[in-house]
Structure formats: C-alpha cells, structure tokens
Image (cartoon, helix red, strand yellow):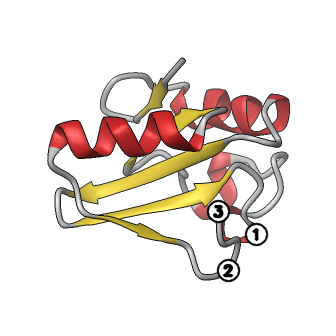
Amino acid sequence: MLAEFHNGRDKEAHRQFQRWREANDGGFFISVRSSKSTMLHQALCPHLGKTDWQQGRYGSLTKKMKVCSRSREELLTWGREKGLTIKVCSTCKP
C-alpha cells in the first residue's frame, strides 16, 4: 500500500514520514521533485539522516513529496503510471 507525505497536504507530514521510515525499515520511497527529477531510496537511506531528525533543525524532509511503500515494484509501477523518470539512489542502491 502506498503512503504519500507532503507539506502541502499536511503540516505533520515530516513527522509522519519519519514514523513511516522507522516502522518500515525494509521499505522504499520515491522523492518527487518533478516528473523528470525523482529518486528511489531505501527507507533508511543515509541521505535523510536518522528517523529522529526533527523538522525544525534542518527543515522538512517532506518539502518535496515522498511516496512510500514496502514494495519496490509497487513504487516503480506507480511511477511508470505517472510518467515519471525514476533514478536510483547511488548511496543506498535500492
């Protein structure tokens, strides 16, 4: 099942995304900047720091939409259906 987190939809998105990452450490997410700039990550990718990172100190992780799933294939299918070009993170290599 997909979960979406974005500040434009919910002021608690950052905190909810961090909770999702912690509860789904084997999952994946796509960070969506635009249809040409998206990246697939593992839930605990070091790019995003630890799951206890608070929004206030460095800003929100959900300024750009995050689409999450425990299934990599579900995310890739979602991206194809949206016409997105999805790159794979070279750090966490999902």
Q: Residue at x 20, y 36 (%)?
A: 81
Q: Which residue is mark 1?
A: 46
- Which of the labelled discs sits on residue 14, or is there none? none
- For the N terminus, the image quarter is top right
Query: Is disc 3 surrounded by few (<14), some (14 to 19) or many (20+) residues within 10 Å?
Result: some
Q: Are marks 3 and 1 in contact (CB under 8 Å)?
A: no
Please identify, in this view, whether the residue under mark 1 or under mark 2 is nearer the observer.
2
Residue extending furthest bottom?
90
Q: Is residue 92 above or below residue 2?
A: below
- For the C terminus, the image quarter is bottom right
Query: Is disc 1 surrounded by few (<14), some (14 to 19) or many (20+) residues within 10 Å?
Result: few
Cα separation between marks 3 and 1: 12 Å
- Which of the labelled discs sits on residue 94, or is there none? 3
Cα separation between marks 3 and 2: 9 Å
Across and down, in percent, residue 32 comes to 34, 53
Q: Residue at x 42, y 22 (%)?
A: 10
- Which of the labelled discs sits on residue 91, or is there none? 2
